[in-house]
Image (tube, rainbow, N blue to C red):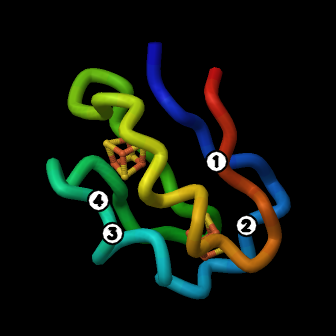
């Protein structure tokens, strides 16, 4: 399992610094590397558009 970022992402960048395993990459829509994500959910708490959810 991993968390995923939906097209609701506005590329604010808030989630990147919250991830303890550096699984989140920048882009027009940010992307979580499923092979790194530990499902800690820290990123979900800072997302202003609720774009991050568990896959
Ligand atoms: Fe990183 Fe945790 Fe978010 Fe996965 S759930 S991308 S490990 S902050
Ligand atoms: Fe996108 Fe949410 Fe991350 Fe901001 S915090 S970059 S809106 S996923």
Numbered disc in front, either 2 or 4: 4
Residue at the spot of label 4: 19
Q: Is mark 2 within 8 Å of ligand 2?
A: yes
- SS for callout 2: loop
Marked residue nearer the N-terminal end (3 or 1): 1
Q: Image quadrant of ligand 2?
A: bottom right
Numbered disc in front, either 3 or 2: 3
User: Do labels 2 and 1 touch, CB within 8 Å?
Assistant: yes
Residue at the spot of label 1: 5
Q: Say left or right for 28 vs 41.
A: right
Q: Quadrant of residue 28?
A: bottom right
Instruction: Determine which of the numbered discs, if any, sits on residue 18 in the image.
Output: 3
Marked residue nearer the N-terminal end (4 or 1): 1
User: Do labels 4 and 3 touch, CB within 8 Å?
Assistant: yes
The quadrant the C terminus occupies is top right
Residue sitting at x 50%, y 69%: 27
Residue at the spot of label 2: 9
User: Do labels 3 and 1 touch, CB within 8 Å?
Assistant: no
Q: Residues within 10 Å of mark 1 (few under 14, many from 20)?
A: some
The spot of residue 11 in percent (x, y) is: 61, 79
Q: Residues within 10 Å of mark 2 (few under 14, many from 20)?
A: some
Residue sitting at x 46%, y 70%: 15
- SS for callout 4: loop
Q: Is mark 4 within 8 Å of ligand 1?
A: yes
């Amino acid at each position: 399992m991993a968390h995923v970022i939906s097209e609701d992402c506005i590329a604010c960048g808030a989630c990147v610094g919250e991830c303890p395993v550096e699984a989140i990459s920048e882009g027009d829509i940010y992307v979580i590397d499923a092979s790194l994500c530990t499902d800690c959910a820290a990123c979900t708490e800072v997302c202003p558009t609720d774009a991050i959810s568990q896959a």
